[in-house]
Image (cartoon, helix red, strand yellow):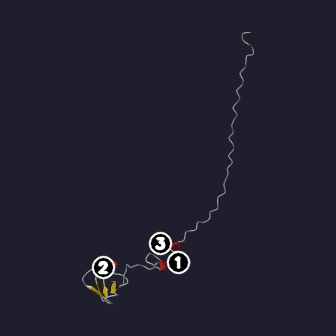
Amino acid sequence: MPNVTFLGPFVSRRRPDSKAEWLRGQPVEVSQEWLDLYRNKLPLQCFLIEGDDSGPINDGNPDSGWTKKDISKWLKANGQSVTGYATKKKLLDLVDKVLNPPALEPEVAPEPEVIEEVPAPVVEAAPEPEPEAVDESIEGE
């Protein structure tokens, strides 16, 4: 079961689910369902949450929860230069390129062209028509 401890800055703070109060420095055992329901009402600057099963996982890689300064520091530690103004989204895109570099396509040797010689079609010459026999006699003479 998770424990929630109120850290301050005041001596007490009203709980989001009842009229009871959190007392500074006193851990309170809550259920995981309760914690999941009211997590957004417990700022991490004021509360210490221990034993949480569904909290954020820090795998050491930058994500949207990191500050720009920390992302830039991580990029520099991983051999990337960050120059000029860059938004957090641009920095996270650069992180994605570092973690997932584009795959190099293997060089494919071009296949040699095979030219097939096709024999020219044989065209048989059509026989020339024989000239008609002309009657050399003149009619009427």
Name of the residue lying farthest toward the left: 19
Residue at x 52%, y 72% (from the top left corner):
97
- In the rendered structure, the answer to whether residue 18 lies left or right of residue 5 reads left
> How many residues crowd mark 3 within 10 Å: few (<14), some (14–19), many (20+)?
few
Mark 2 = which residue?
34
Query: Which residue is nearer to you in this view: 11 or 27?
Result: 11
Residue 92 rendering spot, x and y as whole percentages: 48, 73
Q: Is mark 1 on a helix, strand or loop?
A: helix
Q: Nearer the viewer, mark 3 or mark 2?
A: 3
Would you say the residues marked 1 and 3 are in contact, meaning their CB atoms lie under 8 Å apart? Answer: no
Residue 49 in sight: no
- In the rendered structure, the answer to whether residue 27 lies left or right of residue 110 reads left
Q: Compare marks 3 and 2 and give the one earlier in the sequence.
A: 2
> How many residues crowd mark 1 within 10 Å: few (<14), some (14–19), many (20+)?
some
Mark 3: amino acid: Lys
Residue 22 in sight: yes
Mark 1 = which residue?
75
Q: Label 1 to label 2, Cα distance in Å?
A: 38 Å
